[in-house]
Amino acid sequence: MSSEAPPPTDAEVRMARFVGEQLVPDGRPEIEEHLSRDGTRSLDVLTARDAPAAGFTSVSTLTLHRAPNRVDGSDVRVELVTVLGGVEPRLATGLLVASAFAAVGEAWPLRPGTVFPGVVADLLGGRTEHLLLTAPGTFPRLARYRLEADEFQGGTEVRWLQAVPLHEGERRFLLDRGLDALETRLAEAEVEFHDVGRDPLPL
């Protein structure tokens, strides 16, 4: 993910098309290259306006998988995806890009349960403060994608993680009780994961 990043391979182009079909089946998403503040890293990102419905923005990274991601001794290549409502598309994209660059720059392991502290409050000013990574529940077909073996470093499996806004009390619950317990409580309360201004979950 350097500023001199190579152009996408044919396999990566096909993956980008697949991602676009998941985020906005009937529309035309935008794909842009973003540079880190110091210009040392680049990241291709797909943004779909009014997807999955009017007033929502869906965003997915496309080249984050090029960066190593050490999780429990294994290198698990990932991309990030999010859906936000009532947020300007450029801000939704910026939130995901900032999180991705922070993770790569600080070598954070990207897996379900990873939290980007304070990023939502800092960049969007929403009532939620943090960003939590979970399985891609909104886009189940993005759970795993196989890049062809002859076109990317011998082939690799890419997994998406969905980024959802999180309140501080929910983050503390996650630390105390674990991700499964938090996800169960959020599901029981039918929490609107896309809403950065939602009320905190009573815990």
Image (spheres, helix red, strand yellow):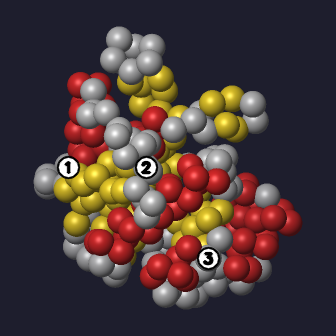
Could you say which is closer to the camera, residue 148 or residue 181?
148
Q: Compared to 113, does 11 lie above or below? A: above
What residue type is disc 1 on?
Pro
Quarter placement of the N terminus: top left
Could you say which is closer to the camera, residue 45 or residue 21?
45
Q: Which residue is mark 2?
A: 41
- Which residue is found at the position 52% from the left and 61% from the top? 99
- Gap between marks 3 and 2 measured at Cα: 22 Å
Mark 2 or mark 1, which has the lower sequence index? 1
Q: How many marks?
A: 3
- Gap between marks 2 and 1 measured at Cα: 30 Å
Residue 112 horizontal/vertical position (percent): 64, 50
Return the mark for residue 39: none
Discs 1/3, front: 3
- Mark 1 burial class by Cα count in 10 Å: few <14, some 14-19, many 20+: some
- Gap between marks 1 and 3 measured at Cα: 32 Å
Q: Which residue is mark 1?
A: 25
Disc 2 + disc 1, Cβ < 8 Å: no
Could you say which is closer to the camera, residue 79 or residue 153?
153
Q: Compared to 32, does 4 lie above or below? A: above
- Which residue is found at the position 62% from the left and 65% from the top? 116
Quarter placement of the C terminus: bottom right
Q: Quick check: 159 left or right of 10? A: right
- Mark 2 burial class by Cα count in 10 Å: few <14, some 14-19, many 20+: some
Residue 138 horizontal/vertical position (percent): 43, 55
Q: Which residue is mark 3?
A: 118
What residue type is disc 2 on?
Arg
Q: Quick check: 116 left or right of 180? A: left
Q: Compared to 127, does 153 lie above or below? A: above
